[in-house]
Amino acid sequence: MTNQQPNLGQREPQPLSQPLSQPLSEMTPGGKAKRRVRNFVLQPLQQIKIGLYSIILSLLFAAALAWIVYYNFAGLVNSVVLLTDAEDEVRELFMDYWRGTQIWVYGSFFLYIVSTVTLSILYTHKLVGPTIAFKRHLRALREGRFNSRTYLRKGDAFSEVAHELNRLSEQLERSYNKEPKKD
């Protein structure tokens, strides 16, 4: 039988505050998770919302602009057709030009949509990632694990908030670990 002394004023070692987010097969030798697209999409609806707002506004603007351009282009075509004897050839020439322009416009707009969604995911990742870390940290504090800390990646937003939250955890840990004074 071993004679174990009680662990006064010290806390038992806590298990990992959170499970590994990646299987060990997807970890690098240094223990860091490999970057994948799904690592950036933490809360898809929240992250894509900014891009969707931009796209909706862009669609409205593009529709208004397309109407203005089409209306003016049709007026130009009709004016030129009235001034020529070869109406069918001129109309066909303008339609070929219009189809070529449409291909470039649709292609450019598609690239705009893809880049807007991509940039919104990358940008909001720097916002959503820290909020998930803060939620985990607050959950740990609520469960009494005052040794929990929030570590953010370089370039993430809210680093000042993470610093203050870590200072709060340190203060709570010191207060929690103080032994009561005996008289």
Image (cartoon, rainbow, N blue to C red):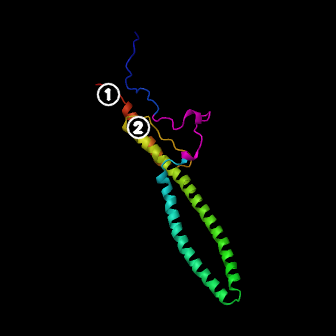
Residue 41 on the magenta segment: no
Callout in the foreground (1, 2): 2
1 or 34, which lies in front?
A: 34
Q: Is residue 26 within the magenta segment?
A: yes
Which of the labelled discs sits on residue 154, or is there none?
none
Q: Residue at x 55, y 57 (%)?
A: 117
SS at badge 1: loop
Q: Amino acid at mark 1?
A: Lys
User: The residue tagged with tag 2: helix, strand or loop?
Assistant: helix
Q: Which residue was labeled with disc 2? A: 140
**Residue highlighted by disc 1:** 181
Q: Quadrant of the C terminus?
A: top left
Q: Which residues are magenta?
A: 17-39
Residue 148 rendering spot, x and y as whole percentages = 44, 36
State the predominant SS element of the stretch in magenta: loop
- Around disc 1, counting alpha carbons within 10 Å, would you say few (fewer than 14), some (14 to 19), or many (20 or more)? few
Vertical placement of residue 167 versus 89, above or below: above
Whether 98 is drawn above or below 117: the answer is below
Out of 72 and 93, give the one closest to the viewer: 93
| Amino acid, disc 2 | Ala
Find the residue positioned furthest to the left: 183
Answer with left or right where residue 183 lies relative to residue 67: left
Residue 103 position within the rendered picture, expressed as x and y whole percent measured from the top left: 65, 68
Q: Residues at badges 1 and 2 in contact (C-beta under 8 Å)?
A: no
Identify the residue at horizontal 58%, vertical 33% (top origin): 25
Work out which quarter of the rendered image holds the N terminus and state it: top left
Q: Residues within 10 Å of mark 2 (few under 14, many from 20)?
A: some
Q: Is residue 26 left or right of residue 163?
A: right
Q: Nearer the viewer, residue 151 or 43?
A: 43
**For the residues marked 1 and 2, what is the alpha-carbon distance in whole angstroms?**
27 Å
**Furthest residue to the top?**
1
